[in-house]
Image (cartoon, grey):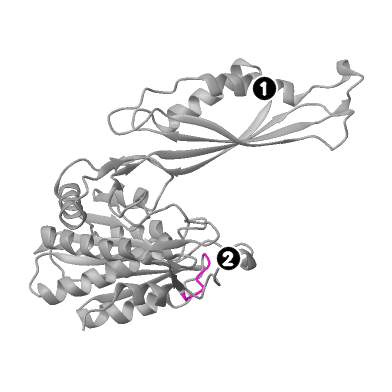
Amino acid sequence: MIRDVVQTTLDLVSRQSVTPEDRGCQVYMDAILGPLGFNNESMVFDDTTNMWSRKGTDKPVFCFAGHTDVVPTGPAERWKYPPFEPTIADGFIYGRGTADMKGSLAAMLCATERFVKDYPNHKGSIAYLITSDEEGPFINGTTRVIDTLEARNEKIDYCIVGEPSSTVNTGDVIKNGRRGSLTGDLIVKGIQGHVAYPHLVKNPIHAVAPVLAELASTTWDQGNAFFPPTSFQVSNIHAGTGAGNVVPGAVEVCFNFRFSTEVTDQQLIDKVIAVLAKHDTEYDIAWTFNGQPFITERGTLVDAVVESIKEVTGIDTELSTAGGTSDGRFIAPTGAQVIELGPENATIHKVDERVNIENIKALENIYYATLVRVLA
């Protein structure tokens, strides 16, 4: 009997795997993959459970990557249906993680089972890289597994990350790259005092204003054929004692760059430091590097996915690098071809998250057709 993608989604969503918890999702996946000939390896790093599962020893290695953790539900009483009691209604499956990304995991498992049964002597290897730390701080998840694989010279050639890339119908958009992300936490220092005695104070808000104005108006690059121009955005500003007659002693500013391959993280840092120096600013700054930009150009993987989407849905897919970061940023630097393909993303992280049943059925068929094109 061929496994049903809807029931598999329901089984996974019913497990309350709020990040970094896995709550048995990977054990469930192991139980499906083991009988198919996969060697299942659990890698636990601190609070994070990861799974590296592989069938075969030959190259190329075709990997499905994803995460079992989900974001918190928010107030459960605001949900139409209990968030961890997945419910089918109006052609959708409702529940936390249906779209991000347990529907994708279910489609991967069902496509793999079909493929292995149809092509028992397929070439290469099939692998799964699954983590419970994608929605959290991403410290002990995919990046640690990749470090382990690199240390033993175990390489991934082709990787599909099951992030919800689609807009309306499965396959209308795939991500063949992502922008880099760099966050700065800036503290500009001043001298606190009474607003009526400006000669006795140094207002850090006044000091940082021209700095932010210059950074916000800077053209960092022009982008390229794959990426839009690098963007600078301030996300948080905090200052003040709460009183209207007190100049604060410091202002805290958090900002973020989403950057293209036309600029490096070090170039961005150097420019920010130069602007701060230009305005004679007294400051402390801490940087958080969230990942380099990556791009997978047309080739074996992209072509196979594009052709499979056309075969299954009739859609001419759009290649995109828009959106946030994903764990693909840890896999691509090893030399792997990486794309992201999953169901519609309209309700991810929201109350009443849901996935269209026909979309996850189509996703299973696309994954299967891609395996056939690459490994049959």
**Magenta region:** 14-19
Residue 124 on image: x %, y %:
12, 64
Question: Label 2 amino acid?
Answer: Trp
Q: In this rendering, would 227 be left or right of 258?
A: left
Mark 1 — residue? Answer: 209
Magenta: main secondary structure: loop
* Viewer-closest of 95 and 235: 95
Hey, which quadrant is residue 50 in on the image?
bottom left
In the image, what residue occupies the spot 22% across and 69% down? 111
Is 253 drawn above or below residue 372 in the view shown? above
Is 192 drawn above or below residue 329 in the view shown? above
Res 144 seen here: yes
Residue 43 on image: x %, y %:
39, 70
Mark 2 — residue? Answer: 79
Question: Label 1 amino acid?
Answer: Ala
Q: In this rendering, would 222 be left or right of 69?
A: left
Is 288 drawn above or below residue 49 in the view shown? above
Assign a secondary structure to mark 1.
Answer: helix
Assign a secondary structure to mark 2.
Answer: loop
The crowd level at tag 1 (other Cα within 10 Å; few <14, some 14-19, many 20+) is few
